[in-house]
Image (cartoon, rainbow, N blue to C red):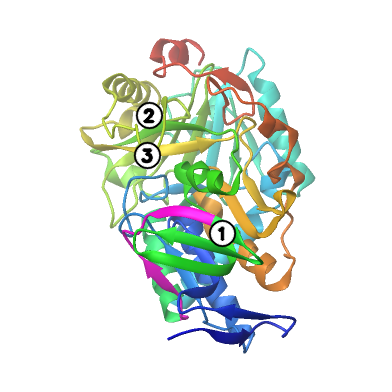
Amino acid sequence: MGNRYLEYCTGVCQCIVSENWQLYKIIGVGGIGSGSLYWLSKLSQRFPKTGGLGILGIEQFRLGHDNGSSQDISRTIRYMYHDASYIKLAPGSYETWEAIESESGIKLVTKTGGLFFTPNERGHVALIDQLAKAMTAENILFERLDGAGIHRKYPQFNVKNKDIVGLYQKDSGFVNAGLANAVHTQLARKHGAEILENTKVTKVAKEGGHVRVSTNNGDYAAENLIIACGAWNNDILEHLGVKVSITVTQEQVSYFGTPNIREFLPDRFPVWICHGIHHDYHGTPINPGCSTGIKIGADASGSVCTADTRTFQVNPERLEAAENFLQEFIPGGYGPELYTKTCLYELTPDRHFILDSLACKGLPNVHVFMGCGHGYASLIGKIFAQLILLGSTEYPISDCFRIDRPALRMVDVKEIINLSGKKQQLPPVPGWRAIKNSI
């Protein structure tokens, strides 16, 4: 086909391009990548000279794979955070999911209400106060509850006579992550985007004002690049002379077939987090139409690995710990194990997102996301699209998401941050006795 000229956006510049040239390229088509693909293809329609032109997603596996961290049928969405940076983004997260649901006609978000509880000792009340303070500052309504109050609201929790403190927030719920990714990609194709599956990136290089991406299926050049490949991010960034300090862990979640199905449907049972001494357990109700099991997992408690060394093997001690927790605190939810699956976490030392460009490295047209936050996947895709197309975004991006923040210079793969923001050592399994004795 040879070379051709394309005048793009406002006609500020002209670029000589080849047949494998795109305005926008995304490496990784999981949660964040699929969201970015959709919003770029959708919003670019407003620009007559770029709408639907040259938007390419590159995925090293098949779409819908379970090798990373973007799948599953229930990923929590909430306002209840200890840091206002996330609370400020939450309204936009709900808004973007509603837009996807409106265009597709498919329900992706289920609101259930959300419960956070912890033992009333050893400084745990300070965590509750921190969550309450952050939500109050953003005018988010919530309720404070003790063990008896939690039991009155949700008798499924066996905490009536326990010294527990907690918070309830009515707008929490879960996103069907796997379904959301599929909807994103199918709508993106509707708006002109292309996707290459089973295509592995072998090299990324800056060439003049654009970026060249080499793959096992050919070379592609683009004006703008989004890197959203989770545990593989550093593999891509290294080609550009960048490496950030992240810890990758293999986590697992389990689904149990409660005999009390009706009591654990979304209209009767919330998403929940229990903050213990060493670990934070979390769970969701049954997602009707997808499973008959309730979900439980221990946050950031898995063994350190890489994307290449993870095993996919279920840790039996962690499974037993989850079973014991259910039997003690949510006994009516316990039943036969339906299945347990593994996934990857990628965590920065301070556990904040990376949501930034590489402008600090002279690459303002390369954008990066790292972190565990599928509830924000569609919003982050829209933020990237606005930054690339408009040069700014309507949504507040905290400085704590910058890729050049001081915390990312601290490399210690043995130390991570739990849901409370408190540093903890990374043990091999969640010790059930420690959890039980703390509540």
Asked if the residues shown at circle 2 and circle 1 are in contact, with their CB atoms under 8 angstroms apart, the answer is no
- Residue 96 appears in which quarter of the rendering? bottom right
Res. 330 mark: 2
Q: Residue at x 73, y 84 (%)?
A: 10
Residue numbers of the magenta segment: 191-204
The structure residue drawn at horizontal position 61% and vertical position 18%, both measured from the top left corner, is 120
Is residue 227 visible to the viewer in this orientation of the structure?
A: no
Q: Kindly identify the amino acid type of the residue bearing the numbered disc 3.
A: Cys
Q: Amino acid at mark 1?
A: Ile
Which residue is tagged 1? 226
- Mark 3 or 2, which is nearer the eye? 3
Residues at circles 3 and 2 in contact by the CB criterion of under 8 Å: no
Residue 401 shows in this picture: yes
Crowding at label 2, few (<14), some or many (≥20) Cα neighbours within 10 Å? some
Q: Earlier in the sequence, mark 3 or mark 1?
A: 1
**Alpha-carbon span between mark 3 and mark 1:** 22 Å
